[in-house]
Image (cartoon, coloured by chain):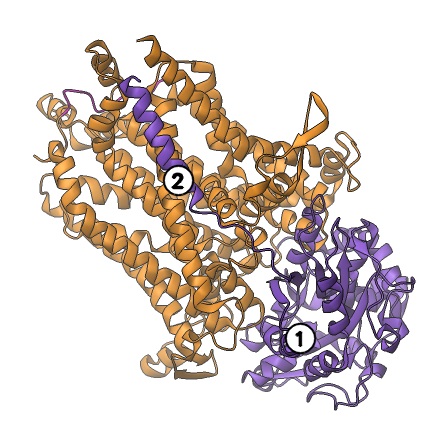
Amino acid sequence: MDLDRLIKGGLIVLVCLWMTVAVVFPVLELLVRSLSNAQGEFTGLANFSRYFRTPALAGSLTNSLTVSLITTMVSVSLGFLFAYALTRTAIPGKTLFLGIAMVPVFAPTLLNGIVLVYLFGKKGVVTTGAFGLLERVTGMALRADIGLYGPVGIILAEAFYTFPQVVLILSIALRMTDARLYEAAQSLGASPWRSFISVTLPGIRYGLISAVFVSFVLCFTDFGAPKVVGGNYNVLATDIYKQVIGQQNFSMGATVSVILLIPTVIAFAIDRFCQGRQQAVVGTGSVPYSPRRHPLRDALFLTYCIVISCAVLCFLTTAFFVSLVNVWPYDFTLTWKHYHFHDTGGGGYAAFFNSVRMSFYTALLGTCLTFGSAYLLEKLQETPLLRRIGYFLSIIPLALPGLVIGLAYIFFFNNPHLDLPFFPAGIPNPFNFLYGTMGILILCNIVHFYTVSFLTATTALKQLEKELEMVSESMGVPFYRTCFRVTVPVCLPAILEIALYYFVNSMATVSAVIFLYSAEIPLASVAVANMDDAGDVAPAAAMSMLIVFTNILVRLVYTLLTRSLKQSAQAWTAP
Amino acid sequence: MSKPSRFILHSLYAAVVLFASVFHPLAEAAEVLVYTALEDDQIPRYLESFKQQHPEIQVKIVRDSTGIVTARLLAEKANPQADVVWGTAATSLLILEQEGMLEPYAPKGVERILPQFKDTAHPPRWVGIDAWETGFCINTMEMEKNKLPAPQSYADLIKPEYKGHITMPNPASSGTGYLTISAVLQLMGEKAGWEYLDRLHDNIAIYTHSGSKPCKMAGAGEFPIGISFGYRGIIQKQKGEPILTVFPKEGSGWDLEANALVKKTAIKPEAKVFLDWAISEPAMKEYAKSFAIVAAPTVDPVPEGFPKEPMKQLIKNDLHWAAKNRSAILDEWTRRYGAKSEPKK
């Protein structure tokens, strides 16, 4: 028993250790820089007071809050309806719908920007009514200028980007439920609405809070969309871009990054508060919920899912079309030539396969690390303080823009010496060997996408009663056996979703890895950025489409391979 | 050994094996790591003659836009990775110089480089290879549709008919944006310069975050006039976009693409070989195919689309003045135009 406790404690320490190296040290580096001037001298809060005296700040802050709040409302409501349709109704084609809903994270955000401009920009298909074609055919002025450049564009792009993440978290929360509660509600004569309010919502409260939190923070910290479609609408995240990339002022960049962390810390406090009251939904005696047919409801939800899916597919089709067209919007000859990558830079197909390799390793290692950490922090009883710290550290990465993670990783991992508090001379940096290898790219991706994966895992784990562990412990079954025999199989859908999430995001991400890739390891997403930079929009779209197709393929393989696996491991959920 | 600890040992072992397979040792052959902001499609063409002359040296390239390359170099200051910086904005190299990150080195043939295109110190800390200058990218098809003549000068840009048709890079985000602002201030003097910028601001539809973006937007017809740089417009025309590149009558602001040796504990002899080659005759001939102005005069004709006497197009630009006053100018710029957040109608 004592050995068991020791191992458990040790494992939690291990979790905190790896989070310390991957999150705390880089963030500390950031804090130190925000308190120093460009020459590295300590200046206290001078940067903060300078930033707060900038007249543009108040505007940026209000703008950031406004777009983030609206985006969150939009994407959580849309995402909730979608996730609800996938888990609680009897509509056909759920797997397909879920697959389509994930598409927005399959593509580099740059592609989202390109497509938005081509659809809604001044010369966009929608703005000009398919270049006047609709007007000629129908005789009506079928065109609409939505005023893309500004808050409208940002909200549209961010809602599109955060939607899949919301669906992911909410559908896992909704899937885990106890049918007995609904039976009880029904037999007590509760109306469907009443049982929705008093059974469904409380049951997914944790997932709902996570979804709100994730979409708010993602939107608050992302600079990709505001950079492309934000026009003159300043937000905090683009302020970082201006400081770091425009003026190479790392101190001010770090200062704004620290300011960006504040809402995350507040959100964390709220999250802890709510979580304290959370009850497990799925207990040892649970009966899985399986939706019964309800023609009207199902028809409505089916229509809704089709509408959303069509919007996503329309987006994808446009992107594919862009990659095939000779010169948009002046020469619509179709050609495959943009897929050759002969006369463009960025590394072509070599870069593409590097990305596949990197994403595979990230998915593999990331999933083990994330689920393992989430399990240990959530299910073990030992060292509550350490677990709380570990939990907090797991939330931090979400608030770090990729750009900031990339730079912090250079500062920390490239430095041959570590300056530690009690070693005035510093010690050789034991992690320096990672720099310039694929290892740092993988670690960076794991950390960059850690929080959403972690929340997904935690959401799934929370819905299993702690009773399970207690019972097995009292019967002398070691915790790891309970974990592998019960917890992992039950959480399998969540685990697979996490692996997929890591893979597709690592394929598509640019912001962090652009600082870390080495000459030997060019990456596809960086090639997209470089080709777009060189004005080769069509080849950039072509490379993006390769990334999208790979992700779709992986998604298909995942669906096929896991269907049987799920059936055997999740037999308990069958009616 | 008890069961749980054996299980954990095995898992750890598996994890280590898996993790180790991810790294491969860095080769230590004769190689030189080059950071550059040159255009991606130019690099293979430029490097051909180097490969012929020095097949024994392996050149490894990390290419990104100017802002990213500079940020990366500065971030790696504690343990510099790059051996050489090639074709990166001189204003960026001035920042590296201030940080003491450059090793003075006079490449072979440095005397052929025109004096205004290299560092004044001996030996120089950086040496220019070509110059790029402010140019307006104008979408001729859209201008025809709107029945607007192409603006020929800075003075034309503030005419009311261009209102809402112009984009330019935000100087706080982009070096190209800054060189144009600094050119206006140097040409007209501070007072008249800011008054001009006030009026220009009224005509600007949006400020972008990259220097090439205004030209790309012009090419796609989004906003027909983009204040960008000359090379950009000319290359887009070659790709089939209806772009006319206009060099402002009053003269263009400019910056250099320049090379430097990175200061690190072990400076490789190959790095110097590379820098020697990078200003040699064959290299200059290749640069001259893309740029009207190269740092060592060649007899090659100016590429199509550039002014016939490109040197006359350049304003008298004080790079050091521009570097020294940068943060003051950007503060003033941001104070005047940055806080205005609503997109203009």
Give percent across and percent down for residue A516.
56, 50
Element type where label 1 sits in the image:
helix
Quadrant into which the C terminus of chain A falls: top left
Q: Chain of mark 2?
A: B
Q: Which residue is rendered at x = 43% and y = 67% of the image?
A: A349
Image location (x, y in percent) of residue A22: 52, 35
Residue where numbered disc 1 is placed = B50
Query: What is the crowding at mark 2: few (fewer than 14 residues within 10 Å), some, or many (at least 20)?
Result: few
Is residue A126 among what the camera can see? yes
User: Which residue corresponds to the image point at 61% horizontal and 59% vertical from the top-left?
Assistant: B29
Where is residue A113 shown, x and y percent of the image? Answer: 48, 61
* Of residues B219 and B95, the one drawn nearer to the viewer in this rendering: B95
Q: Tell me: A386 left or right of A430.
A: left
Amino acid marked by disc 2: Val
Near-viewer residue (B263 or A51): B263
Q: Viewer-proximal residue, A270 or A393?
A: A393
Q: What secondary structure is marked by label 2?
A: helix
Quadrant location of the N terminus of chain A in the rendered image:
top left
User: In the rendered view, does A445 fall on the left or right side of A60?
Assistant: left
The shade of chain A is orange
Do marks 2 and 1 both belong to one polypeptide chain? yes
Q: Is residue A447 magenta?
A: no
Q: Are marks 2 and 1 in contact (CB under 8 Å)?
A: no
Give the extent of the magenta segment: A277-286
The quarter of the picture where residue A150 lies is: bottom right
What amino acid is labelled 1 in the image?
Answer: Phe
Q: Colour of chain B?
A: purple
Secondary structure mainly formed by the magenta segment: loop
- In percent of the image, x 31 and y 18: which residue is there? B1
Pointer 2: what residue?
B17
Label 1: chain? B
Q: Is residue A455 visible?
A: no
